Amino acid sequence: MANPTAALIIIGNEVLSGRTRDANLQFLATELGALGIPLREVRVIPDIEDTIVATVNELRARFTHVFTTGGIGPTHDDITSECIAKAFGVPWEVHAGAHAKMAAYYAAQGTEFNAARLRMATMPRGVVLIENEATVAPGFSMENVHVMAGVPRIMQAMFRALAPKLERGAPVVSATVHADGVFEGQIAEPLAAVQRRHPALDVGSYPYFRPGPVRGGVALVAKGTDAADVAAAADEIEALLVAAGGQAIRGEPRLDDNTTAKV
Amino acid sequence: MANPTAALIIIGNEVLSGRTRDANLQFLATELGALGIPLREVRVIPDIEDTIVATVNELRARFTHVFTTGGIGPTHDDITSECIAKAFGVPWEVHAGAHAKMAAYYAAQGTEFNAARLRMATMPRGVVLIENEATVAPGFSMENVHVMAGVPRIMQAMFRALAPKLERGAPVVSATVHADGVFEGQIAEPLAAVQRRHPALDVGSYPYFRPGPVRGGVALVAKGTDAADVAAAADEIEALLVAAGGQAIRGEPRLDDNTTAKV
């Protein structure tokens, strides 16, 4: 049976303006891969109602799961929750369970449970809360759409609470082999042959740069849900790197952030 | 006149699998904002032809400029260039100028100009090359679609070569004011009033966490193309943070990567 699939919607002007560097994509991509729910598409969109509603409705029809990050705080630019209600055509109303928990929390803190904070207890009708250890204000799941905070620490706590409830697929496993001094243009043909012999796998090629006498090399990756198939492809990759004159090493090369390449 | 707009398409399985953390979004968001070409949407999509063609065609109709990163190397998973030709319905053919330059380069290096490397000189008919200092293999512009490498160092060199040719808008300027010990739930109402008084601006609220006796605060940002309007909004933001009991400080707080927040 085919694996379930996922899409991610990153909601927030701060990512589009460059103010904030997103840290949630890579975390979710890695975690979802391990659960056998590969991430297939990501969108970064602004805090604009029509855009959020249209994007949610398009993606929830195309993917098993849709995750959103951002826009669930108490300020005027936090409109994700209302937009999810509009996307599903359901009322946006105070959630009794979330309200009770937040009221108790703010009372214990001696903090006013004002109109702005009440927005965080207001949700589409029919949600399941995503309670978590990081914040009293929960995320929620509305059918296959999982609405989480944008702050990485809170998002990660929400995902850890949500993950056990998700339908899983066969975990995606990968094998990497790299070789210094071998460049993509040399191994493109035999690598394409590996991909053809293993059509169920995703075979990728990633050049890297490293200062020094040998100015870089290439990392070749085989990825898929059949571990034996991945291992067989990795053996073939190792052989083609050796045939190209390289010393093939299992695993990722050490990289800096500004990788570049001779091709 | 309204500013031109931009969308970014990040093409590559390695970002969707979590193997690679994208570094191009934030660079382009910042650079494009300074050119008055605000980034309005980003998509991260896999190396799948139908997906690339459909995404390019949707976004090039909606935005002034579309930038793509990734998928222009010599290996079988580098299919961006062919997909751009399909999206525009034009032949994909050897570009004489790119071919001449690459042939001379590989000859001087004593490197074989083989079939795989020839793919990098093969482009949609009608492109304008994006020559750059980082690599002999150029990117290209096809009408309003600008096709660049995924490796950050090469992408940045291509963008620097391309930027002077882009139609610019009024630069986006922003002002940030932050205060430790002030939380979003306290200032949501007066901040919404600032947004209402300055409808042309984008007013945002970003909670932050910092270890220590005061566990964080909030950074408030006003952004727009009218510098006087931005300055006036920043004054109002400073006043509302002081009214909330905070010490308002112009500029960004120092943040770690795992910001979290009390709301």
Image (cartoon, coloured by chain):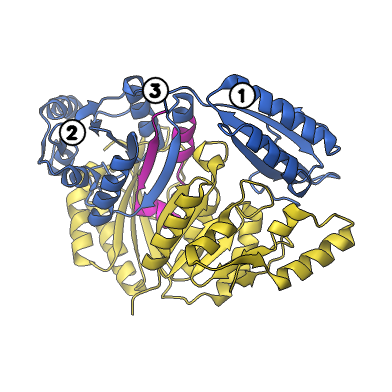
Chain colours: A yellow, B blue
Q: What secondary structure is found at the residue carrying circle 3?
A: loop
> Would you say B204 lies left or right of B23 here?
right
Q: Chain of mark 1?
A: B
| Residue B35 appears in the figure | yes
Chain letter, disc 3 residue:
B
Residue type at numbered disc 2 = Thr
The magenta segment: B3-30
Q: Which kind of residue does numbered mark 3 sit on? A: Arg
Residue B13 painted magenta = yes
Residue B32, above or below A238: above
Label 3 sits on residue: B168
Q: Is residue A80 above or below residue B93?
A: below
A31 relative to A152, above or below: below
Q: Residues within 10 Å of mark 3 (few under 14, many from 20)?
A: some
Residue B98 picture location, percent across and down: 16, 28
Which residue has dot 2 on it? B111
Q: Quadrant of the N terminus of chain A?
A: bottom left
Disc 2 + disc 3, Cβ < 8 Å? no
Q: Is residue B94 left or right of residue A187?
A: left
- Tag shown at residue B229: 1
Image quadrant where residue A41 sits:
bottom left
Q: Magenta stretch containing residue B242, yes or no?
A: no
Q: Quadrant of the C terminus of chain A?
A: top left
**Residue at 42% across, 56% down:** A54
